[in-house]
Amino acid sequence: MTQIKFANTQDEYLKCWNAISALRPNLTKENYLALIDKMEHQTYRLAYIEEENGNVPAIIGFRYMTMLYCGNIIYIDDLSTIPEARGKGYASQLLDFIIDLAQTQKLDGVHLDSGHQRYDAHRLYLNKKFKIMAHHFSLTF
C-alpha cells in the first residue's frame, strides 16, 4: 500500500532526493534544499508517494498560479519516478491526486511543461486528457 504525503520538513524533502535527482541531475542536495526554501515562499509544494518500507519512489512538485490566459491553476514543476520504480503507476497516481486537488479547489486547470524528448511522460499526459497547447521558449543567462 502506498500513501501520498506532503513534504514539510527538511528530512521529508531529503527523503525525496532520489526521485528529484532522477529528474534534475544538475542539482546537488545543498542547492536543492536552498531552492526549496525559496520556492516554498512562492506556493511550491512537494507531494510524494511513500511505500510501506519508507522508500519514496515518486514525487510531484507544484505551485498555485494565476495567469490572464488561463485563470487560477496548479502548475506542475516536477514529476519524477526513480528508474527502478517506473511502470508501476506512481506518476499516474500523483497526477490524479493533483487533478483532484485542483477540481476540489474549483481551479481552472492543471498545467505543465515537458521536455520534448520525454515520450513516456507525454503518453501519460495525453492519456490523462492533457492537450499540447504551446511551445515553451527560454533565454538562459
Image: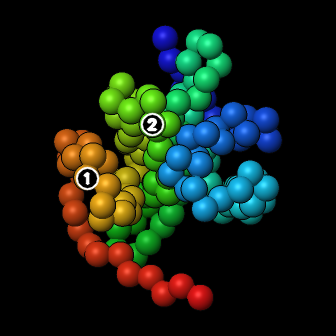
Between tags 2 and 1, which lies in front? Answer: 2
Question: Image point 55% across, 56% down: which residue?
Answer: 24
Instruction: Name the residue beneath numbered marker 2.
Output: 83
Residue 92, position in %: x, y?
35, 34
Task: Indicate left or right for 122 with 38 as reference.
Answer: left
Instruction: Name the residue beneath numbered marker 1.
Output: 119
Q: Is residue 10 above or below residue 132?
A: above
Image quadrant where one finds the C terminus:
bottom right
> Can residue 95 be seen at all in this image of the molecule?
yes
Q: Is mark 2 on a helix, strand or loop?
A: helix
Residue 114, position in %: x, y?
36, 60
Q: Which of 34 and 43 is in front in this view?
A: 34
N-term mark: 2 or 1: 2
Neighbours of disc 1 within 10 Å: few (<14), some (14-19), many (20+) = few
Q: Which of 101 and 95 is in front in this view?
A: 95
Residue 100, position in %: x, y?
39, 36
Instruction: Residue 50: name its quadrant.
Output: top right
The amino acid type found where label 1 is placed reads Tyr
Mark 2 and mark 1: span between their CA atoms? 15 Å
Residue 127, position in %: x, y?
19, 42
> Can residue 41 be seen at all in this image of the molecule?
no
Question: Image point 53% across, 47% down: which residue?
Answer: 22
Instruction: Residue 71: name its quadrant.
Output: bottom left
Q: Look at the numbered discs 2 and 1 and tell me whether their residues touch, using CB distance below 8 Å.
A: no
Q: In this view, does 5 lie above or below 103?
A: above
The tag on residue 12 is none
The amino acid type found where label 2 is placed reads Pro
Question: Image point 58% across, 47% down: which residue?
Answer: 20
